[in-house]
Amino acid sequence: MEKGYIQVYTGNGKGKTTAALGLAIRAICAGKKVFFGQFIKGMDYSELKSVEYIPNFKIEQFGRDCFIYNEPTEEDIKLAKEGLEKCRKILKEGKYDIVVLDELNIAVYFKLFTSEEVIEILKEKASHVEVIITGRYAEDNIVELADLVTEMKEIKHYYNEGVEARKGIES
């Protein structure tokens, strides 16, 4: 790819991370290298095992537990900022063709870092790197900078009927 674009997957509907994972698989099958950075997440999601099966794919979490029902701690903020700095370096180096910043919008929403900090690193990225940003509540300035924005809209979800996250489907 000569030019890498910035894509944002946002909204209240299910499927943002799943879409990013699907794009990652497609890119790897086309011979590309993918870095998948997960902000906020620190739990044992099934996709963490993918590196055992898929070449040219690296996934790393920059969080502890999912704190979204509480306030983020200083440790949560520290981990997120360290993750953002790592992603800055990865984006600038250009060794990966695709860089996914999973739940980055949520990290901004919870003020773990600012959208201005995000925009600064996006402007520094190697020109060929495609960036996928996921998470609800994408801020207007990130949407404005993006080349593609998809909003996932929840119409109906079995979670509202008491169905917990299922291994291999939601986790």
Image (cartoon, rainbow, N blue to C red):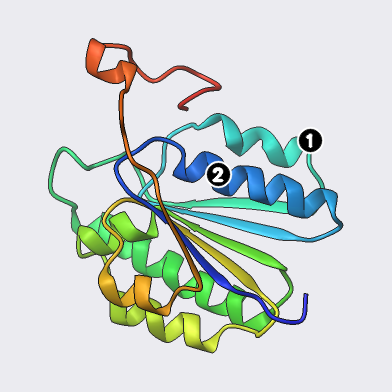
129 displayed left or right of 44: right
Label 1, on which residue?
53
Q: In the rendered structure, which disc, 1 or 2, sits on the residue that comes first in sequence?
A: 2
Which element is circle 2 on? helix
Which element is circle 1 on? loop
State the mark number for residue 19: 2
Q: Position of residue 106 (x, y in %)?
A: 29, 55
Q: Position of residue 40 (x, y in %)?
A: 35, 50
Tell me where residue 19 sits by quadrant. Answer: top right
Name the residue at 83% across, 48% down. 29
112 displayed left or right of 26: left
Q: Position of residue 84 (x, y in %)?
A: 43, 70
Q: Is residue 89 above or below residue 99?
A: below
**Viewer-nearest residue: 150 or 107:** 150
Q: Is residue 86 above or below residue 75?
A: below
Name the residue at 30% across, 40% down. 66
Crowding near pointer 1: few (<14 within 10 Å), some, many (20+)? few
Give the quarter of the figure containing the N terminus.
bottom right
Mark 1 or 2, closer to the camera: 2
Amino acid type at circle 2 is Ala
Amino acid type at circle 1 is Tyr
